[in-house]
Image: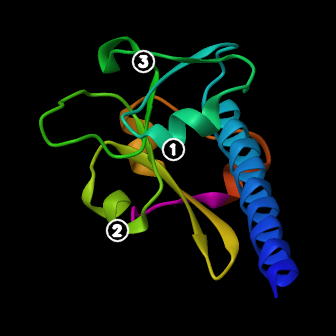
Amino acid sequence: MKYIIFLLITLSTILNAGDSHWEKMIIEKILQSVSNQKELSIYTQDDNVLTMLKGIKNIHISHSCEKADFILAKLDNNTLCNKPELLFSYNEYRRTPSAIGVFFWQKGRPTIRFSSQRLKNFGLHVDGELSKFVTAKAY
């Protein structure tokens, strides 16, 4: 019985680590596709996102949203910053006018959406293979 519990805990840990690896790769691809800058400055208030971003080349964590190029995850209501946001909740994406895109898991698959109008408002566009995820509407 102890062996089975140990095996389940180990397997669970390995699978969760695998998801964060894929999330890290997808987020890096999204940011590279949206921006033509070699190095990006990212601001987030989410500790999980900070942990996930560690080790990504050419992405630096900013401690101020005004100095950042992009914001990842939803900011709290007290923080106002007019920067493009990449969110991880579809409902938040629909309610947030500064959200240019969303990345979330749906039925075990990664889902990516970009709003063409919001990208245009920030003077951005999506290049490469992710351009097929750009839609005219934000919802």
- Distance from label 2 to label 3 (Cα)? 24 Å
Side of 2 where 33 appears, left or right: left
Mark whose residue sits in front, 1 or 2 = 1
* Residue 9 appears in view: yes
Q: Position of residue 118 (x, y in %)?
A: 39, 45
Q: Quadrant of residue 58?
A: top right
Q: Is residue 136 magenta?
A: yes
Specify which label sits upstream in the sequence, 2 or 3: 3
Extreme residue toward the front, this view: 2
In magenta, the rendered stretch is 133-139
Helix, strand or loop at label 2? It is helix
Helix, strand or loop at label 3? It is loop
Identify the residue under disc 3.
68
The crowding category of the residue bearing disc 2, from other C-alpha atoms within 10 Å (few below 14, some 14 to 19, many at least 20), is few
* Residue 125 appears in view: no
Contact between marks 2 and 3 (CB within 8 A): the answer is no
